[in-house]
Image (cartoon, rainbow, N blue to C red):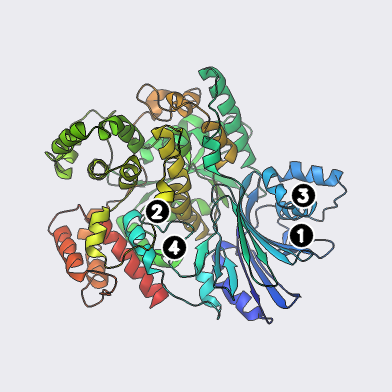
Amino acid sequence: MCGIVGFISPNRDEGSVEKMLQVQAYRGPDDRGVFVEQVGDRVVHLGHNRLAILDLTSSGHQPFISDCGNYIIVFNGEVYNFQGIRKELEELGTRFVSHSDTEVILYAYKAWGLACLEKFIGMFAFAILDKNREKMVLVRDRAGVKPLYYYHNGSEFLFASELKSFHAHPDFKKEMNKEILPYYFQFGYIPAPHSIYKHTYKLEAGHYLELEMKNLKVKMTQYWSVDECYAQEKFDASEKEIIDDLESLLNDAVELRMVSDVPVGVFLSGGYDSSLVTALLSQNKTRKLHTFTIGFEDKQYNEAQHAKAIAKHFGTEHTEHYVSQKELLDKVESLSFYYDEPFGDSSAIPTMIVSELAKKEVTVALSADGGDEAFCGYSKYFFLNKFAPVFSNSFQKTILKSMLNIFDGKQIEKINSFLPKKIRQTNSRDKYTKFKRAMDADSLEEMFRNASSYVDPKVVKDFLNVEAKFEMVEHFAMQKGLSFMDNMMRIDYKTFMADDVLTKVDRASMSVSLEGREPLLDHRIIEYMARVPVALKYKNNQGKYLARQILYKHIPPSLIDKPKAGFQIPLAQWLQKDLKPLVEKYLSPSRLDEEIFNVEEVEKIKKELFEGDVSHANAIWFILMYEMWKEKWFA
């Protein structure tokens, strides 16, 4: 796990490479390397911050140069099956000088070109300078676990693991991409390939970019697509056969991610996904497994007791830390530094804290992200799928909307508190609000988009004076011939998961120089699950049906079956009390840019929040995060 940077320029500029590396030094504090060389009429600059995980010796130093000197790589991530690929290359006559996966990637490219990507199982973002072809190749892994940004305005080309590195380069022109703001304020993240800056992009998951050195022309290619996975024919196999196949895949995925020359642990939340990862790893009795959990004094948000019980069941070396409110609040002002562009997922705060906790004991931590999207875990899938037929009937839809208007979020929250624990929903008010919003749509695509929004697009339109210059239709388009349930999982996999969840975990873990690994995002798992009939993903009114059956082999259902909680914080209460001074400061009428905001409307929803109406808490938080980011990076 590391940080990479690079740029092409007419002249040598080692100073700018060093500055670009320095600003993201926490991504790789163990070593730093720079490569500068003229190729044709231009000078190539490559830089690398190293967090040593495999081959801790100087042989793993980057940028790594091939024996012939014509191929140079900077690499962030891990290729877990590199040892098998290394054997193939050795049979072809390749001689290795290190024990790193970096060298394997470079020689795999030399041997097979970009077809080598088909062989890689892992998370990766890398750049290879191919002097023979006078090309630079940038690659991002299939799921988008590792970030990679590039700046291309026609005459300049820069790339980096994090946007903040661009600020350290004199040719980076800092111009805000205002047209993307409506989507940030709706979803809480900026969807790929866009970024908050003009001419600055996220290399999308499953893509590679080829840059011609002579004219800086870019060619983009998608080498892997989750859409193509879902387009495959469904399996015609028994439930037992599918469970056995999936369990075999999962075992291989988690074991591959234990390959390391440094200590490895697991983030254990007490939910199905992290418990499943822990269960599979615990089968190896010769290995002492470290697990990490944070807890909250507020019982509504605390799952630490569940995680502790599961850790005890598997006999892990468990570390638990109850977080004070002060610890959580102290993180708020650091978010704008680590998250580079406006980012609204408030669960970034506890994710940073659990990363700090793990870093005290290990250098690598396995996370269980991707389980909801692969195994069908989000409650919105079940509810929307159930009401999709109603949605297509105008009379039934009218009746349903009338019924939904009988109750408000506060009443639903109270009703929910009286329900049996087994069916009680966490965050019921927010879920109910999203469901009402979903029903106020004209198509299935819009229904799912509304249900995936943290802020009603109508509310965004009221407080924002900027309009989007493009539509996100392609992001939420339904794939023909695919069930609505599969479509929702497919869309979340390439939008919310890639641009929100994985961004959150990467920045939080790397802020403390901790490598986060994602076994459930092994591409073989989603390729398999995409072909599993929906009836086996959601069965007996249970999501994650197949994952549960595997987990139940290792743990009593009574120890794990409980409502899904997520990584929540009491956001509305914070904004009303502890964070009120920050809200007053950053959302003051004198501070807000009237070209961006309808200041009167922001004042209105801010006042409503302070008077007890929490329906616009997410909107206020997103504005706060935007303003704090703007002060840090755009003032």
Looking at the picture, which amino acid does disc 4 mark? Tyr
Of pointers 4 and 1, the one earlier in the residue sequence: 1
Q: Are marks 3 and 1 in contact (CB under 8 Å)?
A: no
Looking at the picture, which amino acid does disc 1 mark? Ser
**Taking the image as drawn, is residue 360 in sight?**
no
Image spot of residue 224 (x, y percent):
59, 45
Give the foreground label among 4 and 1.
4
Q: Are marks 3 and 2 in contact (CB under 8 Å)?
A: no
**168 to 3, vertically: above or below:** below
**377 to 456, vertically: above or below:** above
Of pointers 4 and 3, the one earlier in the residue sequence: 3
Of pointers 2 and 1, the one earlier in the residue sequence: 1
Q: Residue furthest right?
A: 93
Give the foreground label among 3 and 1.
3
Looking at the picture, which amino acid does disc 3 mark? Trp
Within 10 Å of the Cα at label 1, are there few (<14), some (14-19), or many (20+) other Cα atoms? few
Image spot of residue 527 (x, y percent):
56, 36
Relative to the observer, which residue lies in front, 65 or 321? 65
Task: Give the residue at mark 2.
Answer: 472
Residue 59 marker: 1
The answer to whether 351 appears left or right of 211 in the picture is left
**In 3D space, how far apart are the residues under numbered discs 2 and 1 (Cα atoms)?**
45 Å
Image spot of residue 441 (x, y percent):
26, 44
Give the foreground label among 2 and 1.
2
Within 10 Å of the Cα at label 4, are there few (<14), some (14-19), or many (20+) other Cα atoms? many
Quarter of the picture containing the N terminus is bottom right
The answer to whether 234 appears left or right of 561 in the picture is right
Task: Give the residue at mark 4.
Answer: 339
**In 3D space, how far apart are the residues under numbered discs 3 and 2 (Cα atoms)?**
36 Å
Name the quadrant containing residue 521.
top right
Task: Give the residue at mark 3.
Answer: 112
The answer to whether 201 appears left or right of 400 in the picture is right
